[in-house]
Amino acid sequence: MKKVGVAILGLGVVGGGTYQILTEHREFYQRTQNVDIVVESVLELNRERTRALGVPSDKIASNIAEIVSDPDVSIVVEVIGGVEAAREYVLAALNAGKTVVTSNKELFCKYSHELERAAKRQNAGLYFEASCVGGVPIIRTLLDGVQANKISSMMGIINGTTNYILTKMTNEGTSYEESLREAQQLGYAEADPTADVEGFDAAYKLSILASLAFHTKVPFTKVFREGISGVSKEDIADAKELGYILKLLAIGKQSDAGIEVRVHPTFVRKDHPLASVNDSFNAVFLTGDSVGDVMLYGRGAGALPTGSAIVSDIIYAATHSENKYSTFKNTANADKDTNFISDFKSAYYMRLTVEDKAGFLAKIATVFGKHNISLVELLQKPGKAEDGKVPLVLVTHETHEMSIRKAVAKINSMEGVAHVDTVLRVVS
């Protein structure tokens, strides 16, 4: 039976979960996968964590040099997070000919070209299933499940923190601030939640997934990004009345015109499959030219779900002798022949505060008409909002992003409009 030695860099939440799975399931993998996976070494400065997990003292390394020089270690698992130290350690492992498994979406998003170059040079493996969507096997699906297809679109909920916050706001009517505080208390959100709530985390993941799905480099800088910190409970309540549920969506599309990649809060119809994905769960909806629609759903974070993805990569690397690399030219920047669409098309939700006067809606409709925007739905809330003004909610047909921006700028300058409170996109 083949024996494979593993080193784990970091025993935090995910690293601890990985260690637990590997040690508890060792005999199971021997029996089902015909491979003996042994944790030979861990790099963790917090000795309390190592003791809590029962790591033998002789398995605790003092530095990365000990690990990369250990002939018994063939796979290095990076779960320390961050970028600079992780980048240094991963490159050291790859340059030593070790296969690397990582869960680090920011590192892989920004430096996969550099890591892959080192891996190819040493004929080492580079695996990253756990970098996107936790325990949901989206990377393996794109690489080994739907490769017979030309993927035209992907749309998903790929950040558990924001999905938990929006679920709370939708189901309980709480404010963004209240929901965020609860998410932090439960450990779903960091003390500084910026990476999650402003869409950076989802944008890193979409960059990785879109590159794989569309077989061309999609840099993070090409992803349109908008977070959820400006969303109000009034928007969620009004849209819910119209039959919509708010989600932070990552959307990627490929057509003859080019590629569009965007992350932003989006209203979806309540009967859409993604509308029922709640709390910290994630889901990705793929469309291929042969298979049609495919949806993957599961836990997007956590010690064991993410550890499951890491161990899946370890087993794959241990049982496959040939290393696979990108199906596209993996460089720091996009290929010069790839066109990215910034003026994408979408339907839009808009909430305004306007004077309660006859004929005012006709003036707004005139502005929309000049920009080729037509209305689908209108909701005028009864009662006075402030100083004789009332809230007005509109949903448009699909139109161009630049058209809606120009229309909003014009409406904001109109006499009688207090302000355009919210503009959010809608999956029509």
Image (spheres, helix red, strand yellow):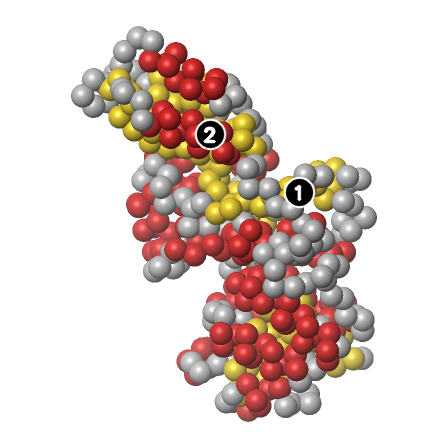
* Residue for point 31% across, 26% down: 413
| Closest to the observer, 163 or 215 | 215
- Please provide percent x and percent y for residue 25: 65, 70
Q: As displayed, is residue 241 above or below residue 126?
A: above
Residue drawn at (42%, 46%), measured in percent from left and top? 227
Q: Residues within 10 Å of mark 1 (few under 14, many from 20)?
A: few
Instruction: Quadrant for the C terminus, please.
Output: top right
- Mark 1 highlights which residue? 258
Q: Is residue 351 above or below residue 293?
A: above
Front residue of 189/128: it is 128
Determine whether, in the image, residue 343 is placed left or right of residue 216.
Answer: left
Q: Residue 135: which quarter of the image? A: bottom right
Q: Is residue 59 above or below residue 320?
A: below
User: What amino acid does circle 2 point to?
Assistant: Ile
Question: Disc 2 or 1, which lies upstream in sequence?
Answer: 1
The residue shown at (43%, 30%) is: 406
Q: Is residue 150 left or right of residue 108?
A: right
Report whether residue 280 is seen.
no
- Percent across and percent down for residue 332 are 61, 64
Where is mark 2, residue-wise? 404
How many marks are shown on the rendered structure?
2
Of residue 25 and residue 328, the one placed in the foreground of this image is 328
